[in-house]
Image (cartoon, coloured by chain):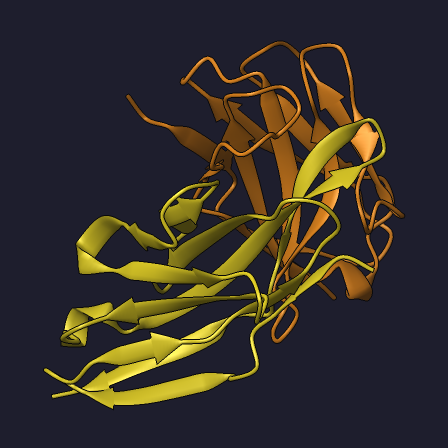
Chain colours: A yellow, B orange
Amino acid sequence: AQSVAQPEDQVNVAEGNPLTVKCTYSVSGNPYLFWYVQYPNRGLQFLLKYITGDNLVKGSYGFEAEFNKSQTSFHLKKPSALVSDSALYFCAVRVAYSSASKIIFGSGTRLSIRP
Amino acid sequence: NAGVTQTPKFQVLKTGQSMTLQCAQDMNHNSMYWYRQDPGMGLRLIYYSASEGTTDKGEVPNGYNVSRLNKREFSLRLESAAPSQTSVYFCASSEVASGSYNEQFFGPGTRLTVL
């Protein structure tokens, strides 16, 4: 079955430290991978995506993600965390579904940055 | 440019009542989606519309119906609300009809409580 997993419900990091939010996936064919962020009482906002090419993808707000095909992972990273990065983060993967494509979302990881 | 808008923002229903959630986008996107978000379960696709005039079931369609009124608008109807439909509902849109690898843009959500 095609799926995406976020193994950590919550990640806690001190401001200024590097952060990593983990994501692994299982798809048939080439994976198209996404990260979204959700701030309280808001809809999801697109951060970045991997389609093909360079394994290190850069996105909004200083975030980047590393695609690792052998480990089927797509971890989200940032070199220096900010308190304002505190939010709910979703990894997602495009899958084929019926006659069209859709995105499957992970269960989300709550990132908490302490001052 | 408002992006994706949803009405209402909040709604409380009694079991058995019906209601329609409205969604509109002004980005001229072909595809539109309805998701529900429940704690610890990420986002689950209810219905989607790959293009104007077409609709298709997602992962959790039971108890819902949709109408793609025109290219801009995609409504979600609960004919007979049940407590299990208490959730936050998000509408989204994307540029490519098949979903492809283009990111989705999300509305602010509707918080629905069914008593």
Left or right? Give the position of A44 relative to B48: left
Image coords of residue A69 (percent x, y): 55, 61
Q: State the image quarter where residue B77 is shown.
A: top right
Which residue is at a point 71% across and 61% down the rendered structure image? A3
Query: On the rendered image, what quadrant is the C terminus of chain B found in?
Result: bottom right
Vertical comparison of A31 with B115: above or below: above
Which residue is at a point 61% across and 30% down the rendered structure image? B99
Image coords of residue A45 (percent x, y): 37, 48
Residue furthest to the front in view is A70
Image coords of residue B50 (percent x, y): 69, 22
User: For this rendering, which residue is in front, A64 or A103?
Assistant: A64
Visible residue check, residue A41: no
Vertical comparison of B27 with A90: above or below: above
Image coords of residue B112 (percent x, y): 62, 56
Query: On the rendered image, what quadrant is the N terminus of chain B found in?
Result: top left
Which residue is at a point 50% across and 18% down the rendered structure image? B29
Vertical comparison of B111 with A111: above or below: above
Vertical comparison of B37 with A49: above or below: below
User: For this rendering, which residue is in front, A82 or A4?
Assistant: A4
Q: State the image quarter where residue A19 is shown.
A: bottom left
Which residue is at a point 42% across and 46% down the rendered structure image? A49
Left or right? Give the position of B105 relative to B13: left
User: For this rendering, which residue is in front, B4 or B56?
Assistant: B56
Left or right? Give the position of A68 relative to B74: left
Visible residue check, residue B65: yes
User: For this rendering, which residue is in front, B88 or B98?
Assistant: B98
Total labels: the figure holds 0
